[in-house]
Image (cartoon, grey):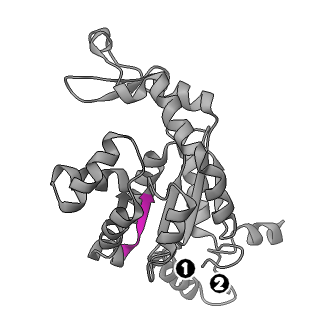
Amino acid sequence: NIGGIKDCFKSILRSVNADQPLNDVYSQVYTYTSKKPRSIAPRTPRIVILGPTGSGRKTVAMQVSRKYDIPIVSIPTLIKQQIVNKTPAGVSMKSYVTREALVPDSVLMPIIRDRLNQKDCIAKGWIMIGFPRTREQGESLARIPGLAPSRVFFLDIPLDIAVERLTQRTLDPITGDRFHTHEHPPPTHNIKDRLRQHPTDDKEVVQKRYQAYTIYYDELQDYYSEQDGIHIAADQDTYTVFEAVEAGIVNPLNKNGF
């Protein structure tokens, strides 16, 4: 069914008239196949990836970043850098982080705005993880001129799967390598014997962090449903999740996206 085949590949299909000298046919085919394809990623993409602990936000962000050369803006990492560097904002944020409380937007938003206005983000866009955590933060992000997200993804995963995924992770204290009981087991018994569980992968800690995300989940979902937020089942293998996120990036949104 040639019509069906054409329809499947219409985004990259190029028709060549074969009723001409063979050299001309070869020339046109060669010219088309030699051209570097235009990137189908959104221009200056502004991507937000939301999800609870264990959903694989960082993994997916790294996969997208590598393929499309888009900087990752991790808000938890940004906060830690401010605290370590003892900036005025870092000093203000430290007490909130110690108490595991939300950092006030009045302190956090100027830092985020400054990061998103740096050259790499202006030129290439950005992938944000760890923010927003509340509807109010989402609204604050949207109010920054020219920096409203162009794509928002929710990586949804059941609590029991998140717990299973994280509690089976272990860390090699000598090399820093991470392993997983099923997905990436240690290669030798010597390595296995020295593996330790990271404190943040303890079952009670995972459950607590997961529940902290769900507190504001409904209000975030309601807010971003008005802007074509994309939900993806994150209890699949990482490549399948990446493919779903990539499809959401390169395909136009139903309403206001590009």
Residue density around tag 2, few if under 14, some if 14–19, many if 20 or more, within 10 Å: few
> Can residue 127 be found in the magenta stretch?
yes
SS class, disc 2: loop
Question: Is residue 43 visible in the rendered structure shown here?
Answer: yes
Q: Please identify the quarter of the rendering in which residue 29 is found.
A: bottom right
Residue 232: image location, x then y, percent: 64, 50
Q: Position of residue 181 (x, y in %)?
A: 46, 19
Q: Which of these two is toward me, 109 or 114?
A: 109
Query: Observer-nearest residue: 93 or 213?
Result: 93
Q: Given the image, on which type of amino acid does mark 2 rest?
A: Val
| Residue 71 appearing in the image | no
Whether 235 is drawn above or below 169: the answer is below
Residue 252 pos. (x, y %): 64, 74
Amino acid type at mark 1: Val
- For residue 11, which numbered disc appears in the image? none
Which residues fall within the magenta stretch?
Answer: 124-128
Q: Which residue is mark 2?
A: 16
Q: Residue at x 56, y 37 (%)?
A: 211
> Please, what secondary structure does the residue beneath circle 1 have?
helix
Dividing the image into 4 quarters, which one contains the N terminus? bottom right
Answer whether residue 126 is magenta in the image. Answer: yes
Tell me the residue at 31%/66% (across/down): 111
Residue 143 vertical position relative to residue 164 in the rendered view, above or below:
below
Mark earlier in primary sequence (2, 1): 2
Image disc number at residue 29: 1
Please name whichever residue, 248 or 208, is drawn nearer the observer in this view of the structure. Answer: 208
Where's the C terminus, which quadrant?
bottom right
Residue drawn at x 67%, y 82% is: 15
